[in-house]
Image (cartoon, rainbow, N blue to C red):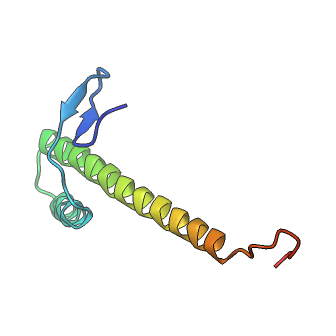
Amino acid sequence: MAAKGTRTDDKGEDAAVPELSYEESREELNTVVRQLESGGLSLKESLALWERGEELARVCEQWLEGARAKMAAAMDERREDDAPADGDTPF
């Protein structure tokens, strides 16, 4: 598994990538989408932008999945803290 700040490339090797925040990734993804929608690009340029957009979408999804996991863990911890100390009490 790739370490934080790296990703696995097509050959299965770790490749360093700059750490982007969710907001930075989302904004750059919006820019990529606007460029693609505006047209006037060569096929090669369009494909490169599409690939960058896919990468940015993965970064955003990773941030969201991490946030969901943290929220779930916090909610589970809260439920455990609120559980009655007496094992005989069902609620």
Position of residue 69 measured from the top left corner of the image (x, y, whole percent): 49, 59
Q: Nearer the viewer, residue 33 or 8?
A: 8
At 29% from the left edge and 20% from the top edge, which residue is drawn?
Answer: 11
Position of residue 84 measured from the top left corner of the image (x, y, whole percent): 74, 76
Residue 31 vs 49, above or below: the answer is below
Position of residue 7 measured from the top left corner of the image (x, y, whole percent): 27, 36
Q: Quadrant of the N terminus?
A: top left
**Image quarter of residue 2:** top left
Q: Quadrant of the C terminus?
A: bottom right
At 32% from the left edge and 22% from the top edge, which residue is drawn?
Answer: 12
Q: Nearer the viewer, residue 69 or 11?
A: 69
At 23% from the left edge and 37% from the top edge, which residue is drawn?
Answer: 6
- Residue lying at the far right in this picture: please name it: 88
- Residue lying at the far top in this picture: please name it: 11
The count of marks equals 0
Q: Is residue 48 left or right of residue 91?
A: left
Q: Is residue 1 left or right of residue 32?
A: right
Residue 17 vs 13, above or below: the answer is below
At 53% from the left edge and 62% from the top edge, which residue is drawn?
Answer: 73
Position of residue 3 measured from the top left corner of the image (x, y, whole percent): 29, 36
Residue 42 vs 2, above or below: the answer is below
**Image quarter of residue 76:** bottom right
- Residue lying at the far front in this picture: please name it: 86
Q: Is residue 42 left or right of residue 59?
A: left
